[in-house]
Image (cartoon, rainbow, N blue to C red):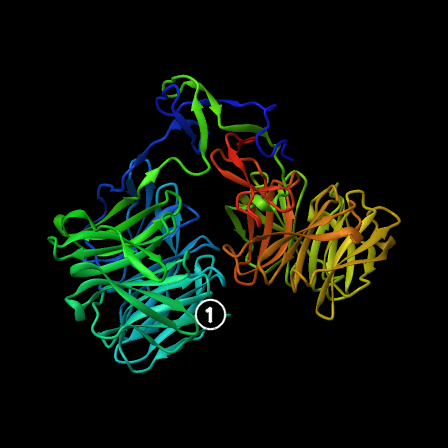
């Protein structure tokens, strides 16, 4: 708990810190992300130097950002080498505005003449999906980036369709809500099709192809995913002329398309950009308008059953070609790159901002010294910068990339800390007279308000139903559909990404449909929740936490309410809590055990908690050791829900805390949740599409310079609750400055 809210004169008003840069006595300072302090400063918008990734002509660039490895990825046909299809990864150095690239990799060594290629990143599996046209067919490959050297390894070649294929650089896009990809293309002189792709390991599979245009040429396909409507917007040239769009929706492994609507009715250039503005929940299309002297123009789209565009506004009053666009969440604007024929065909940049349903544009800035085209914009969330890939005509049309640095100011509404009490050299200690009190805030674990994905996961290869971890974090356990209990050793404690080979224990002699797994605190007893016979079974482990040493103890208890799915125990073994389903309604139920940890002595207390107000399907629970919290898995909602006990371990006092954590950015559906021994890490099982266990941080240790808000349950979180109550800015892992 915080010691203070507000300005308490009994708390210290000074803070010791390390200077970053020279500090002047009496000047205001801000706290940096590393905990140091600096004078207030800023920088104007700028572009970094060109960084080459291909020493020959590049065409029709496509790009994405690998959030697992924090890498920029570009894919392209290499026009200087017989149109070999290539993919390359790069590391952004935000301090120096440079990018270092690995060696480009051919997507298939047997193919040349690859005319089109598209790439996007699967955040659930940490994989690239690369789609390309060659050899009169369209293919896909799964790619993995090695962060140690920016190399890329590719899986096997999988054919999607055959024929004379047209496909745009934005024809493959990822859906974070379903964990699947949508791919669109046209067979020349025939149908335009869409197909859903699912990545598993280094392989990809496809659903049923859906036709969205019959016997009509479409080309230059671009897509964005609208997270507000959970739909794709597919933009395309129709018949090589008008710019049109359709709304696409994934359901399972199928996709459906809306009727077509116009973005631009009339001839349109074959290079256009499409971006989703998540701040305003709008689509922005940027294009060259032949009906108005080929001026650079942008329109705003709204997604419903279809997508409707309006408000066409000129951003460049000269011939504009090779237009691309991407949303910049750092600035809240849509960034646009294009070739300005009115200025020596230079690569040029503007930002578009939506206000009151209209577009306003920044002043255009040239970022190349000569002719450039084939632009593709990718936002790097790690460095918070926009990366522009392009073909540079001043260097034999080589593939290069440029960093766009937005206007920066290190002063925000939250990070101002106070006045330097004395002058200090760079790296020296300094005393700051703070503009607010300094509050000591102890670290708290089991905290969903500060939960975040750790970018660590492990693919089990089977649907995960429930998970558990041993006391020292060296073993992870899981139950999968119709399969034995699985056990894997973690070579680094509590790090799911270091899971090793599998050991198993078969429970089929008792139940062919195991749903839950948990252990006694000493690891000598294991409990399996079986759906086939609606029982909880007890097993003895001759070696603690070693499932291969398990034997059935001939002890079980039948569920009292309905079908059981998962089980947890009070730390002393005298109470048991079970998720049970009856007539489609899910309950958490309570049992007492007359003999500790002996399920054969369990009796139902008649205490139950109906979860239907929060979730329709509870697919796992975890009871914290002191009996003050239960964490439940809302399977369909893709959320971990927190419930609090009014009296420890007394289910009759349980209530929903109004606190939850979404896992939708990692997986489509979830089953099973557990925490490590101190509650600093949470593990969630991804069911169906992902077959993966994901790791999250759930500790409230502060990151210096991060802002914190008081939550409705009295804890601290990094996002404002309702009402919004600002608590302060972190100046260390355990200290918060509370502004007066």
Residue, disc 1: 250
Would residue 83 be visible to someone looking at this image? no
Quadrant in the picture for residue 440: top right
Using the image as rendered, state which of residue 579 and residue 435 is in the foreground.
Answer: 435
Asked whether, in this view, residue 403 is left or right of residue 498, the answer is: left
Please count the marks in the image. 1
Asked whether, in this view, residue 339 is left or right of residue 378, the answer is: left
Using the image as rendered, state which of residue 668 and residue 607 is in the foreground.
Answer: 607
Would residue 577 be visible to someone looking at this image? yes
Give residue 139's position: percent from left, percent from top.
34, 66
Give residue 691's position: percent from left, percent from top.
55, 58
- The secondary element bearing badge 1 is classed as strand
Circle 1 packing at 10 Å, graded few (<14), some (14-19), many (20+), is many
Give residue 84's position: percent from left, percent from top.
24, 58
Give residue 579's position: percent from left, percent from top.
73, 59
> Which quadrant, please, contains the N terminus?
top right
| Residue lying at 25% horizontally and 52% vertically, measured from the top left | 350
Q: Residue furthest bottom?
A: 215
């Amino acid at each position: 708990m915080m010691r203070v809210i507000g300005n308490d004169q009994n708390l210290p008003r000074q803070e010791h810190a390390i200077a970053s840069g020279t500090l002047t006595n009496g000047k205001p300072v801000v706290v940096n992300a590393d905990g140091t302090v600096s004078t207030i400063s800023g920088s104007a918008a700028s572009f970094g130097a060109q960084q080459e990734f291909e020493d020959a002509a590049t065409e029709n660039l496509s790009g994405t950002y690998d959030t697992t490895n924090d890498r920029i990825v570009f894919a392209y046909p290499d026009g200087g080498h017989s149109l070999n299809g290539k993919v390359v990864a790069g590391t952004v150095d935000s301090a120096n505005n440079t990018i270092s690239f690995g060696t480009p990799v051919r997507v298939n060594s047997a193919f040349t003449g690859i005319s089109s290629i598209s790439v996007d990143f699967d955040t659930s599996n940490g994989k690239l999906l690369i789609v390309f046209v060659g050899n009169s067919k369209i293919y896909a490959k799964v790619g993995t980036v090695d962060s140690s050297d920016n190399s890329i390894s590719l899986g096997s070649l999988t054919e999607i369709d055959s024929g004379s294929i047209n496909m745009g650089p934005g024809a493959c896009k990822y859906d974070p809500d379903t964990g699947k990809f949508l791919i669109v293309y046209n067979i020349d002189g025939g149908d335009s099709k869409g197909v859903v792709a699912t990545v598993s390991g280094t392989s990809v599979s496809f659903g049923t192809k859906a036709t969205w245009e019959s016997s009509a040429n479409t080309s230059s396909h671009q897509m964005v995913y609208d997270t507000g409507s959970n739909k794709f917007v597919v933009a395309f040239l129709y018949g090589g002329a008008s710019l049109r769009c359709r709304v696409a929706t994934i359901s399972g492994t199928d996709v459906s398309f809306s009727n077509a609507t116009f973005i631009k009715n009339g001839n349109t250039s074959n290079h256009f950009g499409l971006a989703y503005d998540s701040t305003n929940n709008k689509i922005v299309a940027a294009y060259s308008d032949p009906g108005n002297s080929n001026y650079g123009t942008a329109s705003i789209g709204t997604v419903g059953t279809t997508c409707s565009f309006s408000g066409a506004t000129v951003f460049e009053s000269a011939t504009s070609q090779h237009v691309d666009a991407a949303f910049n969440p750092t600035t809240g604007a849509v960034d646009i790159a294009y070739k300005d024929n009115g200025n020596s065909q230079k690569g040029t940049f503007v930002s578009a901002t939506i206000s009151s349903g209209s577009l306003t544009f920044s002043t255009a800035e040239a970022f190349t010294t000569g002719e450039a085209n084939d632009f593709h914009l990718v936002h790097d969330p790690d460095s918070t910068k926009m990366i522009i890939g392009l073909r540079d005509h001043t260097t034999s049309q080589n593939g290069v990339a440029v960093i766009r640095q937005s206007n920066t100011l290190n002063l925000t509404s939250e990070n101002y800390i106070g006045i330097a009490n004395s002058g200090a050299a760079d790296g020296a200690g300094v005393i700051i007279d703070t503009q607010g009190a300094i509050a000591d805030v102890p670290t708290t674990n089991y905290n969903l308000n500060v939960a975040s994905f750790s970018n660590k996961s492990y693919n089990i290869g089977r649907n995960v139903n429930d998970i558990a971890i041993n006391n020292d974090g060296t073993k992870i356990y899981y139950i999968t559909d119709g399969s034995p209990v699985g056990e894997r050793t973690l070579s680094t404690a509590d790090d799911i990404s270091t899971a090793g080979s599998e050991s198993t224990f078969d429970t089929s002699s008792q139940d062919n449909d195991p749903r839950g797994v948990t252990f006694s605190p000493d690891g000598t007893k294991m409990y399996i929740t079986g759906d086939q016979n609606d029982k909880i079974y007890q097993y003895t482990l001759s070696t603690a936490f070693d499932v291969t040493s398990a034997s059935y103890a001939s002890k079980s208890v039948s569920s009292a309410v309905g079908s059981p799915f998962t089980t947890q125990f009070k730390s002393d073994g005298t109470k048991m809590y079970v998720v049970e389903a009856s007539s489609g309604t899910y309950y958490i139920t309570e049992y007492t055990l007359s003999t500790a940890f002996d399920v054969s002595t369990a009796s139902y207390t008649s205490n139950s908690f109906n979860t239907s107000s929060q979730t329709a399907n509870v697919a796992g629970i975890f009871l914290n050791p002191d009996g003050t919290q239960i964490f439940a898995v809302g399977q369909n909602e893709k959320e971990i829900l927190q419930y609090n006990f009014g009296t420890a371990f007394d289910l009759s006092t349980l209530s929903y805390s109004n606190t939850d954590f979404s896992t939708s950015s990692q997986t489509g559906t979830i089953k099973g949740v557990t925490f490590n021994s101190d509650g600093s890490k949470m593990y969630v099982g991804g069911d169906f599409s992902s077959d993966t266990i994901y790791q999250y941080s759930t500790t409230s240790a502060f990151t210096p310079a991060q802002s914190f808000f008081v939550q409705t349950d009295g804890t601290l979180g990094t996002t404002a609750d309702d009402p919004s109550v600002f608590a302060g800015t972190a100046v260390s892992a355990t200290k918060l400055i509370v502004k007066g």
